[in-house]
Amino acid sequence: MTSFFSVIDYSIEDAETGRKLIREFSKIQKEWVAHYPGYISASFLVSIDHKRVLNLVRWKDEASYYNFENNSNTEARMQAIAEALKKLEGKAVLRMTESPRYKTAYVYKSES
């Protein structure tokens, strides 16, 4: 199945900051993103050294993502993200200057 992903990458100060960032961004997914057609899921990955959190937002296809991007209230969503970051006791810094978008190129599945 072909999917489309947006990937958001944050540097974090420590494990507790990572937990709180994930909690707050889960709320943002629920309130601002998940109800758009074609949204599948949001996965949060934390590095084993607790220095980075990746948010992989999976969409059915590229058109679904661009529908969200073109029709959502980006300004209000960005304000909600800013407010979520203010709630963290530790530091979380966005690690990119653009919004990376990815298409599924290949999926290998084990035969077992």
Image (spheres, grey):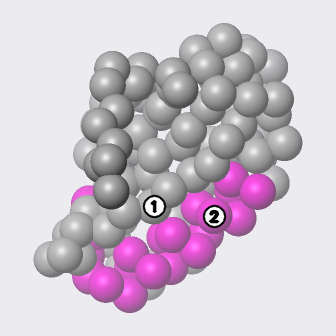
Residue beneath the point at 41% across and 39% down: 7
Q: Secondary structure at mark 2?
A: helix
Q: Which mark is residue 16?
A: none
Give the amino acid at mark 1: Phe
Q: Is residue 62 left or right of residue 107?
A: right
Marks 2 and 1 in Cβ contact (< 8 Å)? yes
Q: Where is residue 19 drawn, in percent x and y?
A: 45, 80
Q: Circle 1 is placed at which residue position?
A: 44
Q: Nearer the viewer, residue 9 or 107?
A: 107
Give the amino acid at mark 2: Ser
Q: CA distance from mark 2 to mark 1?
A: 9 Å
* 83 versus 88 height, above or below: above
Q: Circle 2 is placed at which residue position?
A: 26
**Most common secondary structure along the magenta stretch:** helix
* 66 versus 43 height, above or below: above
Packing grade of label 1 (10 A; few <14, some 14-19, many >=20) is: some
Q: Nearer the viewer, residue 15 or 48?
A: 48
Residue beneath the point at 23% across and 68% down: 47
Instruction: Classify residue 39 by image quadrant.
Output: top right
Q: Is residue 77 left or right of residue 9?
A: right
Residue beneath the point at 41% across and 44% down: 8
Residue beneath the point at 30% across and 49% down: 110
Q: Residue furthest left?
A: 49
Residue range (magenta): 11-30
Magenta stretch holds residue 24: yes
Q: Where is residue 5 drawn, in percent x and y?
A: 48, 32
Q: Where is residue 38 drawn, in percent x and y?
A: 74, 29
* 63 versus 109 height, above or below: above
